Amino acid sequence: MKKFLVTLSIFAAALTQAQNNTSYWQQHVDYKMDVDVNVKNYQYTGTQKLVYTNNSPDTLTKVFYHMYFNAFQPGSEMDLRLQNIQDPDSRMAINNGTRENPDFESRISKLKEDEIGYLRAVSLKQDGKSVEVKEEGTILSVTLAKPILPGASTTFKMKFEGQVPVQIRRSGRNNADGVALSMTQWYPKLAEYDFEGWHADPYIAREFHGVWGDFDVTISIDKDYIIGGTGVLQNPEKIGYGYQKEGEKVRRKGKKLAWHFVAKNVHDFAWAADPEFIHDTLETESGVVLHFFYKDNKKFKDAWEKIQPNTAKLLQFYNEHVGPYPWPQYSVIQGGDGGMEYAMCTLITGGEDYESLMGTTAHEFAHSWFQQLLGTNESEHPWMDEGFTTYISTLAGHQLKGNTGNPFSNTYRGYNYLATSGMEQPQTTHGDRYKVNMAYSIAAYSKGAIFLRQLEYVIGEKNVAKTLKRYYQDWKFKHPTPNDFIRVAEKVSGAQLHWYLTDWTETTNTIDYAITNVADTENGTAVDLQRKGLMPMPIEVTVSYKNGDKKLYYIPLRMMRWQKPAEGNIERIVEKSWPWAQSNYTLQLNTPKSEIDSIEIDSSEKMADIDRSNNMVKP
């Protein structure tokens, strides 16, 4: 028995060591694509050479491609989802009823043959050998001719053809602003493979996850069309349209122009084209060149011109508060159906209202850090990119406008509505699997932003600021997970924080603390506190005295094994820690009740307490 236990102990130690030595890895792709576009029938053909490097420890016998445009066909999964969700996206459905009694109809279900989208692999070879393919909706499954060993590379060559759908969601032709082509999710895109396995998610509604790599893309299109998008144009002297050097004359030959773009270290490629685009550029202090593409229409021009210097200010804010933007340029392009982030660019509709355009630009530009640079899986963890983006863009907009007050009041109000609605699902829910769109939107944007804002309450504003910068340094050009972020926060602060990630993102537990009684005692005043919600928090109680003085009583959460550093000028008293299993806690003050004006839990309003009516008393 003793010998068995010793052997078991050695095996366990070896296993632990092996797990600890497992290093981060990610796959790599190099795309070279040549595409020819017919602007009359909205069809295009292309060739794709893709060099795929398997940096995983696994041997791969299959790969998968996303064929996103196939979603825009009657009977697709995207179409079916629109027909069975109770609150379909208003851009994608028609309400034939009333607001009170809606009768929704999927726009996709009504598409005609020349209006649908499609993307088809005409031929595909691996290292010169034919492979077995199977198309199922928006996923192309490929059984390899030869397995890809760990550390090995293989080359896929594909001929493909596509049709640009009528604009319904993100991609399409002739959007509401009259932009001819919004070309996003337009090419056969290899699915990501990581430590969780393949991410061959069908395109139903939500967003994306891609393999890091380099793109070399040539787009041949009628010479009257102007393109903006991912990458740096390699032949500006042949193109012009604002890309050429100042004073350089450009002679465009033939009926079509071949636009040659190169993008390094990105995980997607998007573009838009229109014959009426105005193209403005602005070189910033950091050296990054901002490009703006918008319709030559007087109802849009004023707002699109006005956002340009403020976009430069946004760049400076994000550079300072997260980390330097690493690519040479960024383009803000009129297109799409709202606002959507892509590598080195965004597509945004509108411009009649400046405030709306500026707010959307601030949000989408911030995605260049939270998703395009810190490449989280938008399908599995939408709260990480949408929430973090909402947090930093809200702070940026607040500073840009010179506003005072709480910039997140509406964000907390939205979360509180969801948390008390009975419709909330954990943030670990896959983006496509929420019962209603409302629950997805609030969980991703509002609750995701509160994750960071509330973390300021938990570990301090300075520690959160340091965490974001360390997160950038440790995880740029990678695919971080929620645990990767919280480990950065733990290393920066010294606090134990896994409980915070667990309760906030993996459950629908809520925070609710209350002051239940205030009574005189022989030694002063006893303040009875109660944890009514399941989610624990450290507690800050501000006591305001009738003589104008204030004191902050800090009650550490025991499972954090840590105390938050003092912030601000108010006198702080650290009390004994509060364990989670203990629902009630008595705070003993050394002054009589008669001298106290008010007692308040979380005067900062950063804690997402679902019932603040019991957070303050005036004895």
Image: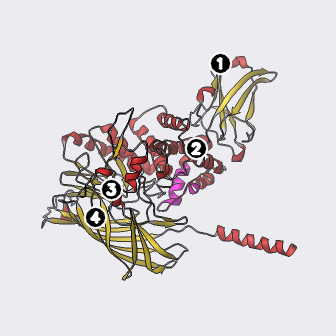
Percent of width and height locating residue 87:
42, 42
Quadrant for the C terminus, please.
Answer: top right
Q: Secondary structure at mark 1?
A: loop
Pick whichever of labels 1 and 3 is earlier in the sequence.
3
Q: Which residue is mark 3?
A: 72
At 19% from the left and 44% from the top, the residue drawn is 297
Q: Which residue is mark 4?
A: 162
Look at the numbered disc 2 and give the secondary structure of its residue: helix
Q: Which mark is residue 455?
A: 2
Above or below — where is 583 with respect to 561?
Answer: above
Nearer to us of marks 2 and 4 is 4
Extreme residue toward the right, this view: 2
Predominant SS along the magenta part:
helix
In the image, taking residue 157 as reference, residue 251 lies left or right, namely left
Q: What residue would you read off at disc 1?
A: 546
- Tell us which disc is closer to us: 1 or 4: 4
Q: CA distance from mark 1 to mark 4?
A: 73 Å
Looking at the rendered structure, the kind of residue marked 3 is Phe
Dot 1 and dot 4 residues touching (CB under 8 Å)? no
Count of number-bearing discs? 4
Q: Amino acid at mark 2?
A: Leu
Which contiguous range is marked in magenta?
Answer: 466-484
Q: Is residue 481 magenta?
A: yes
Above or below 558: residue 530: above
Residue 250 shows which numbered tag? Answer: none
Callouts 1 and 3 close, C-beta under 8 Å: no
Q: In the displayed structure, would residue 360 be above or below residue 150?
A: above
